[in-house]
Amino acid sequence: MLIKLYFLICIFHQIIKIECFNYAEVEKFGSSIIEEPDTSGKIFFYLKINDYSKNSNIYIKFTSEEKENLVFYYGFVSIINPYTQSISSFEKISPKVFKDEDDDRTFYFSMKKKSNNNFLAFYIESKGAFTSRIIFENTEKDESKKVIKDIIIA
């Protein structure tokens, strides 16, 4: 009986690992780091947007060693629930610009608050597994303008 119970616990643990998403909650103008993402290739960041008024700009900076095969989505949600969150209503978004530094690539995004929901859900999907730390940051200003200016000058 004990062996059967151990076997069932092992199977349940593997199912949970398959269904698991990395996610983090981020305060306004805050940041979050996921040091060791799992192999699902799916990450959610939930930015608290209560303090943003409707139609105000939101600036996001995303940094990772992952440089290719990333797809970005965002949506406005009232609760945090990465396990049942449907991204079918989310919008696909492309970075305004990106910048490479050492092994990292930083992607810059800008969007407007379109609803009165509590959170901006920012979803990143990799065609493979994430293999390095992930940094998500909500910035006060549009930092992509400086990157674009530096590219033009170079």
Image (cartoon, rainbow, N blue to C red):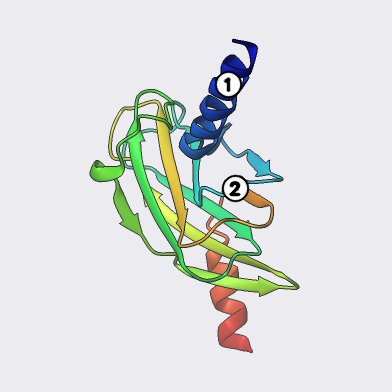
Which element type, helix, strand or loop, lies under badge 2? strand
Circle 2 Cα neighbour tier, 10 Å, few/some/many (<14 / 14–19 / ≥20)? many
Residue most toward the right?
Answer: 102
Q: Which residue is mark 2?
A: 136
Left or right, 27 with respect to 80, comes to: right
Q: Give the residue type at disc 2.
A: Phe
Q: Give the left or right position of residue 131, taking residue 43 as reference.
A: right
Q: Residue drawn 55% across and 34% down?
A: 14
Identify residue type, mark 1.
Ile
* Sequence order check, earlier mark of 2 and 1: 1
The answer to whether the residue labelled 2 contacts the one labelled 1, judged by CB atoms less than 8 Å apart, is: no
The C terminus, quarter of image: bottom right
Does residue 97 sit above or below 109 in this rendering? below
Q: Residue at x 53, y 68 (%)?
A: 145
Q: CA distance from mark 2 to mark 1?
A: 34 Å
Residue 113 is situated, as x and y percent measured from the top left of the image, at: 35, 40
Where in the figure is residue 66, as x and y percent of width and height? 60, 64
Furthest toward the bottom, the residue is 154
Q: Residues within 10 Å of mark 1 (few under 14, many from 20)?
A: few
Give the numbered dot on residue 104.
Answer: none
Closer to the camera: disc 2 or disc 1?
A: 1
For residue 1, what is the image quadrant? top right
Q: Residue 93 at what x, y percent from top left?
A: 36, 58
Q: Which mark is residue 9?
A: 1
Q: Tell me if residue 52 comes above or below residue 147 in the rendering.
A: above
Residue 79 screen position, x and y as percent = 39, 23
